[in-house]
Amino acid sequence: MSAETARPSYLVPSAYGVAHLAVDAATVYTVFATVAVHRIEPMAAFALIMGYDLLAFASQVVWGALADKLRAPRGAAIVGVVLAGLGVAALGQSSSAAMVLAGVGNALFHIGAGALSLYTRPGRAAPAGLFVGPGAIGLFLGIWAGKSGAVAWPFALGLTVALALMVAVRPPVIPYADESLDRSAPKRSVGLVIIGLLLFSVFVRALVGYAGAHALPKALEVSFALTLAAFAGKTFGGLISDRLGWIETSVVALLVSAPLIAFGGRELSLIVGGMFLFQMTMPVTLTAVVMVLPRKPAFAFGTTCVALIAGAIPTFYPATKAFYSPYAFLALILLSAAVLYVALRMLLVPRSAKLVLHPEA
């Protein structure tokens, strides 16, 4: 990525991060409130929520490819916010329509705003964390409000703010036509290996992230603490990695998190600390995927979300809990650390003359 596309501040990813919180809160609220309003039976509710997850996450790769082809990530994000608003409006009318609008709206917003955020300071991980981190709070608020029967107007107001931010904040220009970006990226065969390793790391992070706290009580305060850990880890992980080095920060964070998550059991402080460290790798992983596909940032963002939902889905089924064990989690996290180390070495070491790994030191 060219330094010429960098912007002098983190205003854009921070503003889009606020919009991300609002969009995630509204779309998740829509789905869970729809279940309550229409008194949907448990199995049908599971199917509805699963449908939303597949649309919101798995479809991002398709919408991302389209947004890159049209060179319109900002337009995709704006349309996504509008569709999310229509989903809120439809939740009392049709559960299926509300779910589809919420899922597609969420997906469009993510790939559009995500691509723009990553190009505010190309080659740095901080923008990814500032954009993605607030989404954890949005998910928590949406699930809690949807299940508790909260009114819809605060979420409609939040989407209005999100739309205003998308329209008012000047985005960076993504250099889609700059063929020199392809020459600076890894060769195709090497790039495919790097992406495969990075996406495997995302898959493991999702699997362990959803399952690692299974022994903790299912209480609101526990969920809130884990949410704050995810928010802080993602938000500050990129900033810390840019200062101390991507490989050093990511690998050390995973290695230290491994025993905390694997053997933390019912000790909330250990699990929360482990999850904070565990989530710190997300901004680096996401930015690295985009560095391999510099002229397809929306598509690249979408691929990570496909890996994320692929890792999360197994944890939705109670039968999977039979495989939960401290040593399984330990092995998965250590494997993730090794895979991420190899991927980042393959990506960064050949670029060491061009890429500053400690840009703020």
Image (spheres, rainbow, N blue to C red):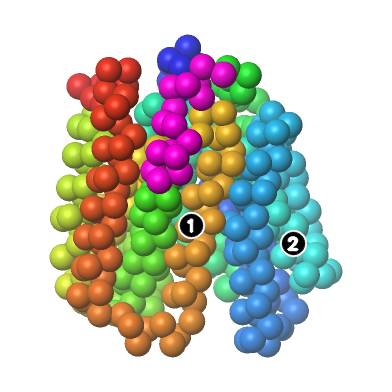
Give the answer, above or below, for where 227 lies relative to 6: below
Question: Extreme right residue here?
Answer: 93
Magenta part of the chain: 179-194
> Which residue is nearer to you in this view: 1 or 13?
1
The label shown at residue 307 is: 1
| Residue depicted at x 21% and y 76% | 326
Q: Quadrant of the C terminus?
A: top left
Question: Extreme front residue here?
Answer: 189
The label shown at residue 100 is: 2
Question: Where residue 189 sits in the image (x, y, percent)?
Answer: 44, 40
Report whether 194 appears left or right of 254.
right
| Residue depicted at x 29% and y 27% | 350
Question: Where residue 133 sits in the image (x, y, percent)?
Answer: 43, 46
| Residue depicted at x 33% and y 77% | 214
Q: Is residue 295 visible?
A: yes
Report whether 23 appears left or right of 84.
left
The amino acid type found where label 1 is placed reads Ala
State whether the magenta stretch is mostly helix, strand or loop.
Answer: helix
| Residue depicted at x 38% and y 76% | 219
Give the answer, above or below, for where 82 lies relative to 140: above
Question: Where residue 106 sits in the image (x, y, percent)?
Answer: 64, 52
